[in-house]
Each structure stands twice: as structure tokens, then as C-alpha cells.
Amino acid sequence: MEDPPRRPRSRLAEVAAGLRDFYSGPYRRTFARAQQDEDDLFMVIVMAEALGVPNPVSYYTVELLPVVYEQFHDWHRRMGLDRSPLEHFSCC
């Protein structure tokens, strides 16, 4: 059995994907680090009230706490804290 001929559309998509990898490949680490920094800042903003920092938008960020709790352990380890800084939330 012989493979059916490739459609030009799929070849174009493969070329586009290859070019995207070629141009963005060297910057993957930089993009990943920038994304991690943004995620850490978001975590600080959401957890500010629990960490003892006055947060003027705590009314809006309190809804995000259940989502952030899953990532809390990784975050406090990246920040260099061996134990959880929150008295009421122990993850270690």
C-alpha cells in the first residue's frame, strides 16, 4: 500500500511550524523564565492579604485562592522559603 499524496495545506503547516521553531527556539528559555516571573507576581498579588500585605483588590482576588493553593508549595520553594509562610496553611 502506498501513502496517499500529501496535501499542500499540511506541507504549508509543517513549514510554518518549522519556521516558528527555528525563530523562537533560541528564546524558549527566556520566554519560560518571563512566564515564570509573571506567574510568581500573580501569586504574590493573590496571596498578598494572606501574607500580611495590604491588598486593595482582595475582594476580587479571594475568589482565586482555591486555584492558587495548588501551586503554593512550588511557589514558596522557588522563593527560597523552606516552610510555608502562612500559619493557617501548611503544605510541607
Image: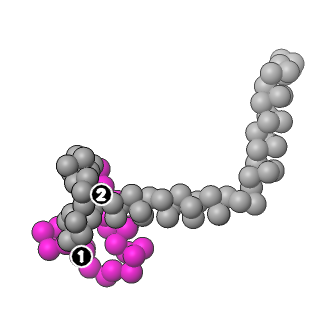
Q: Quadrant of residue 88?
A: bottom left
In this rendered view, identify the residue nearer to me: 12 or 24.
24
Q: Please provide the residue range marked out in magenta.
A: 65-92
Residue 73 appears in the figure: yes
Q: Quadrant of the C terminus?
A: bottom left
Q: Which residue is mark 1?
A: 85
**Residue 72 disc label:** none
Of callouts 2 and 1, which one flags the residue occurring earlier in the amino acid sequence? 2
Q: Quadrant of the N terminus?
A: top right
| Residue plotted at (14% across, 74% down) | 87
Element type where label 2 sits in the image: helix
**Residue 69: percent from left, percent from top:** 27, 58
**Residue 23: percent from left, percent from top:** 79, 51
| Residue plotted at (24% across, 57% down) | 56
Is 9 contained in the magenta span?
A: no
**Residue 55: percent from left, percent from top:** 24, 61
| Residue plotted at (83% across, 28% down) | 12
Q: Which residue is mark 2?
A: 46
Disc 1 marks a residue whose amino acid type is Pro
Left-right relation of 24 to 63: right
**Residue 29: percent from left, percent from top:** 65, 63
Element type where label 1 sits in the image: loop
Disc 2 marks a residue whose amino acid type is Val
Q: Is residue 55 above or below residue 52?
A: above
Give the class, few, some or many, for how many residues have Cα within 10 Å of label 2's Cα (few <14, many ≥20).
many
Q: Is residue 71 above or below residue 17?
A: below
Of all residues, the one furthest to the left in this rendering is 88
Of all residues, the one furthest to the front in this rendering is 56
Residue 91 appears in the figure: no
| Residue plotted at (34% across, 64% down) | 44
